Amino acid sequence: EEECSRRIPLLFLILFVSSVSASPRFNSFMVASSAGATGAVRNVTAFETKVYELCKQIPKGKVSTYGSMAKALGCGAPRSVGQALRRNPFAPTVPCHRVVAADRRLGGFFGETGEGSSALQRKRKILEGEGVRFEDGKVASDCLFDASQASSHKQKAPSRSPISKRK
């Protein structure tokens, strides 16, 4: 929820491991930092993949909420969606900046919260650049995207990888 990825400055490599993962908990992609730092390699979970696929369907000029995404995914846990987006290694292909809090405030970004944080100012600039309007410090209600209107994601495995281009 509070950051798309602390490692955005690093060049990320996506390694295709296999078409069938060894564990049903993980999909077939691993994320590795080009710096090769210990612990920088991790599997992207199936849940994270679903979150990233749904997030990619939020159009420019719109935002969704963590709660709306959780409901669309059938998980009922907005914080889980936020944590998945916090670990998003695919930004900006997966536009985690387009997800906000239920009250339409920006929430967090890059691990920072609070209206005056430089990260939230950056998130707001990105959203404004995409056409999102703000009223009284909140995203305008007509800029909300109902995640349940996106392609059905409930109980459905994603059909594409999180890094594939949007159509």
Image (spheres, rainbow, N blue to C red):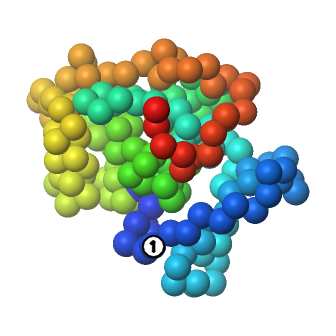
- 157 to 34, vertically: above or below: above
- 152 to 81, vertically: above or below: above
* Residue 111, image quadrant: bottom left
- Which residue appears at 72% of the width and 27% of the height? 156
* Left or right side of 42 for 104: left
Which structural element holds mark 1? Answer: loop
- 102 to 27, vertically: above or below: above
Residue type beneath disc 1: Leu
Compare residues 34 and 86 and report the one nearer the observer.
34
- Which residue appears at 18% of the width and 32% of the height? 131
Question: How many marks on residues?
Answer: 1
Compare residues 125 and 90 and report the one nearer the observer.
90
Q: Residues within 10 Å of mark 1 (few under 14, many from 20)?
A: few
* Left or right side of 97 for 122: left
- Tell me where residue 37 appears, x and y as whole percent: 57, 84
Q: Which residue is mark 1?
A: 11
- Which residue appears at 67% of the width and 23% of the height? 154
- Tell me where residue 133 appears, x and y as whole percent: 15, 29
Compare residues 137 and 90 and report the one nearer the observer.
90
* Residue 158, image quadrant: top right
Residue 76 in sight in this render: no
- Tell me where residue 8 appears, x and y as whole percent: 40, 66
Report the residue that reaches farthest toward the left: 136
- Tell me where residue 13 appears, x and y as whole percent: 55, 69
Residue 147 in sight in this render: yes
- Which residue appears at 80% of the width and 51% of the height? 19
